[in-house]
Amino acid sequence: MLVGVMSTYKRPPRLIRLTALISKTYGIDIIFVRPPDVNIEKGTLTGKMLINNKWVTQEKEIPEFIDITPYCFKKKYKTVTDYLKQKTFLSDNRENVLTKEALQEYLKEDPEYSHLVLPTYKVMSFDDISRYLEKYSKVVLKPSDGIQGKRIFIVEKSTDKYIVGHNTHEKNMNEEEFYNLYREKVKGQMYLVQKYIVSRTRQGDPFDCRIHVEKNGNGKWQSAKNYIRIGIGQKVISNVNQGGGIADPISFLKANYDDKWKEINEKLKKLAVTLPYKVEELRGTHIMSLGIDIGIGKDGELYLFEVNDGPAFKTLIGEIAYLRSNYYKYVQHKILGINN
């Protein structure tokens, strides 16, 4: 069987190489392609296949299954992705994509997950921010189109000033200065305002738990890895690309939550194998990969920050490659009915 792996990378990353090597043991060949590599008129694609441990350019008919990343569903590639939706089975067809706000609203109505929900609202005006600062005293401003650390602010209102955290910096502003920040950075940019929760280490650094889940060889959700992301020296989020680090959940929880660590860890493990099914149900389509970002309050309660359907993979290449190659085998036999 031939499986397409479609990405916007210019060349196959290490994850694709390792996935291709493991897949070969199941009789599955991988062809790495980008959206422009698809020839709609001919019904073919031209990409790279790993032959004798070297990437070799090959032209093949459209495979019956393509593992496609969300980043391929850009407007400029719409003709290609629309064609592929009709032509082949995609790992994610991007139907009914949930915004952050919509997901929070849906989960709020589900007794099993409502405890995870942080109060979240659209920013329509400066008055919206002021109103929620009055209600919560400390809020997070974040773009609704995806988590990007350079665009996230934490804001606290005191009697006569605003304390604004951004990346590793914190600044005191008067109302005029804060309004200018809103006008320049937030206004018209599809922002959300969210209640702030204290998810910080004992040293005061922000952190979250990334739960990276993948479909396995039985077509079930499985945690590839749970790990703690710590924003060392940062004011807002645990962005490891800006000087942060990662830690094992058990050792981290023991160091920060004393005798509560075991209970918290069990909650995280349970969430990994339950919440993905809820997200899939809400979208009404199949998904192959998710990154779930969880905050942990001082009291050990869990809060949902994000669900990302294009999670980073550099910290767990081996785990992902193993699960994906086995999922390809599952798709081959159980979904497509190919037995050779």
Image: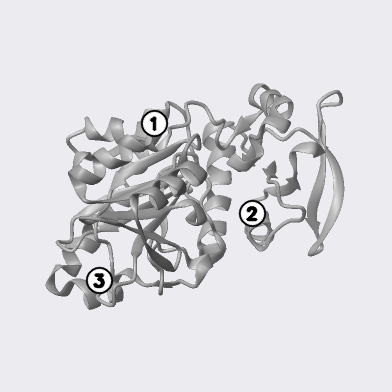
User: Residue 336 versus residue 279: which sits nearer the camera?
Assistant: 279
Residue at 46 percent of width and 71 percent of height: 244
Q: Which mark is residue 253?
A: 3
Q: Which residue is mark 2?
A: 23
Asked whether, in this view, residue 107 is left or right of residue 96, the answer is left
- Percent x, y for residue 155? 32, 54
Question: Depth-wise, is mark 1 or mark 2 nearer the camera?
Answer: 1
Q: Position of residue 4 (x, y in %)?
A: 70, 42
Instruction: Report the residue marked by disc 1.
Output: 124
Spot occupied by residue 31 in the image (x, y as percentages of width and height): 75, 47
Q: How far apart in space, not on screen, are marks 1 and 3 (Cα)?
A: 38 Å
Identity of the amino acid at label 2? Ser
Residue nearest the viewer, comparing 25 with 15:
15
**Res. 67 visible in picture:** yes
Residue at horizontal 62 percent and vertical 34 percent from the top: 338
Question: Disc 3 versus disc 2: distance between alpha carbons?
Answer: 36 Å
Q: Earlier in the sequence, mark 1 or mark 2?
A: 2
